[in-house]
């Protein structure tokens, strides 16, 4: 049997059966059973040396690839259903590498009720993952367009932590490259905070439940997931909606862990918050009268959300602070730069 | 505006509108409208240096990536509907490269009534394309399983021509590397045949109409697309169906172009037919009494199909010829080798 067929047999053994999966991995195409209604679909690439480090644990890599796409589905308010996973890798990594990636991916998807139904393998000079995920919109899909003057702007979680985690991971890799593995890695930050930051980067949890609630209960007028940075993604929401996003400096939810990290590295935590990227939080607009209903829904889901600004007439995204107004719509990650 | 947003705006301008596409490229996920019923989904990777040459024309590359996935949908008998396209490439190739790939991909899909609805871009050390395609099964989906003893085995088109085209392309690249561009490139083969072989490799047309007819009219008991080689893919159909595929040497549809090429290169055309890969033809099993109905359907579609053997009790795939019986289930492409 060829290595690819052998891989598919091992993968099938890993996957739980599901009534909705009529044909899973191992035929020319997967066949799944769906009721009527619209379909939400998204895809993401993760490239070695650009989106992750070469020594990343394969299961965590699989989880992360799936989380990135789940975050897109969250941003449109869709219930994840099925996904396809392709893995390109140097043959010397061995088939076990691909199987562990698939295992991590399938496990993360299962946490959200979704199934791995197929994929492709190829040799390549370096590792690349491609996930295509689809699901079912819960009510009217959330769009980037739809925000109006007078709406409030909210964000979930603590953007900037992933960027801090990426910095810490780079520093740890530099220690390792020198053959040094200090026990007390960063004495300026508590161990719990170090772990929180590193996990925010390496193993983000997508805001699927929040996205579903926003769509189902019609709480948001517009939404986007923060993958490239709050600044650039606020600019995208503003452009799609034909409005201006005003972020208010004192309202930004800068976590204690982020502040400790910024102090240690002598960086501005607001820059990390705005330009960091990799957060996979949701940024969304809410009609003013709905603030209470939103707060109740979010606290029922145990998801921290914070009002960070407002929607005005105009264009672009700005930060309003004690020093005045600053354009932030260009702060963030460009897909043609390496992040690692 | 960031280069990725600029790309999306240019891409949107290229794409025709479609009523079924509620949200196309440029939001977090695409939203498409579908009726009830099952969904067929497939994905394929194309890697530079493995699946295509570095100097491949970007539009043709896009067409080929889409054709590879369409061939999978053809093999399950599904009408193509929507696809996602991701492109990883070295930034020095420029955004125009990605746009031309997307243009070729969207044009090939449109020939089959399907729409590009989203994707992702990333920088990477070399080019990699990922296509995820889905569609609607026309009747009962065709499976690799389902063939029974007594069925006849058929193939469409002329497998082996793509492998010959790949050889010719390599030879042409070697001429070019030496700075030589002979006008009469391969005097042993007619110009039309050279073109036929090279096109079979670089720009295959998927057998979508045939796959739809096989499923809709319940003509085939099992089917697979020939992407890795008739030998290995016959072995896969045999394994999935729990039967043995017997290919009969005198029945193989070896084209005149393939025979000229094999004579010139002193290769066995049967080896090219069985082990070549990249054919994107359909290999399928038909109940004996349905031969006439199949011939009528295929000739109505102007698709050449040929009975090349039979299904027997047992396992594996063999070639039966004047010299006896030979195992062919391992003849073909392994996804961990480079093809270019």
Image (cartoon, coloured by chain):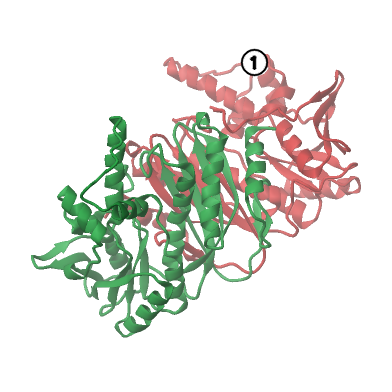
Chain colours: A red, B green
Question: How many numbered markers are drawn?
Answer: 1
Residue at 89% x, 42% y is A149
Q: Is residue B173 left or right of residue B17?
A: left
- Left or right: where does residue A114 sit relative to residue B30? left
Q: Nearer the viewer, residue A192 or A109?
A: A109
Whether residue A244 sits left or right of residue B59 in the image: it is right
Image x and y of residue A151, in percent: 87, 43
Q: Visible in this render: residue B333?
A: no
Asked whether residue A123 is in view, the answer is yes
Quadrant showing the N terminus of chain A? bottom left
Indicate the position of residue A294 as horizontal and vertical percent values.
Answer: 82, 48
Taking B27 as reference, is B192 above or below it? Answer: below
Residue B286 is situated, as x and y percent measured from the top left of the image, at 33, 77
**Residue at 30% from the left image edge and 77% from the top image edge:** B148
Can you identify the residue that label 1 sits on?
Answer: A265
Q: Chain of mark 1?
A: A
**Which one is nearer the viewer's eye here, A41 or A166?**
A41
The structure residue drawn at horizontal position 66% and vertical position 20%, both measured from the top left corner, is A261
Q: Image quadrant of residue A268? A: top right
* Up-down relation of residue A180 to residue B56 (above or below): above
Image: B2 above or below B324 = above
Where disc 1 sits, the SS reads helix
Instruction: Tell me where residue B249 sits by quadrant.
Output: bottom left
**Residue at the left extreme, as displayed:** B323
Of residues B86 and B185, which is closer to you in this image? Answer: B185
**Mark 1 nearby-residue class (10 Å; few <14, some 14–19, many ≥20):** some
């Amino acid at each position: 049997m060829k290595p690819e067929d052998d891989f598919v047999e091992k993968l099938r053994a890993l996957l739980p059966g599901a009534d909705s999966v009529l044909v899973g991995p191992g035929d020319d195409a997967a066949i799944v059973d769906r009721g009527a209604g619209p379909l939400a679909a998204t895809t993401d690439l993760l490239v070695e040396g650009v989106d992750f480090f070469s020594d990343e644990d394969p299961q965590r890599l699989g989880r992360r690839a799936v989380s990135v796409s789940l975050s897109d589905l969250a941003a449109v308010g869709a219930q994840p259903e099925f996904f396809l996973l392709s893995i390109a890798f140097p043959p010397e990594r061995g088939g076990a590498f691909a199987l562990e990636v698939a295992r991590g991916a399938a496990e993360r998807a299962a946490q959200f009720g979704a199934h791995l139904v197929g994929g492709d393998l190829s040799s390549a000079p370096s590792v690349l993952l491609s996930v295509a995920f689809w699901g079912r919109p819960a009510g009217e899909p959330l769009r980037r367009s739809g925000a109006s003057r007078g709406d409030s702007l909210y964000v979930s979680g603590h953007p900037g932590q992933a960027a801090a985690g990426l910095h810490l991971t780079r520093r740890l890799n530099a220690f390792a490259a020198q053959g040094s593995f200090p026990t007390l890695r960063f004495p300026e930050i508590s161990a719990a905070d170090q772990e929180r930051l590193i996990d925010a980067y390496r193993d983000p949890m997508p805001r699927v439940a929040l996205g579903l609630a926003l769509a189902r209960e019609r709480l948001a007028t517009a939404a986007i997931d923060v993958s490239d940075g709050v600044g650039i993604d606020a600019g995208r929401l503003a452009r799609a909606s034909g409005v201006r996003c005003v972020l208010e400096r004192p309202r930004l939810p800068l976590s204690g862990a982020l502040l400790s990290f910024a102090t240690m590295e002598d960086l501005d935590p607001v820059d990390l918050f705005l330009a960091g990227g990799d957060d996979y939080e949701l940024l969304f607009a809410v009609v003013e009268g709905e603030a209470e209903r939103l707060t109740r829904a979010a606290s029922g889901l145990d998801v921290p959300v914070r009002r960070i600004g407002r929607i005005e007439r105009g264009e672009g995204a700005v930060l309003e602070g004690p020093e005045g107004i600053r354009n932030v719509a260009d702060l963030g990650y460009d897909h043609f730069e390496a992040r690692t």
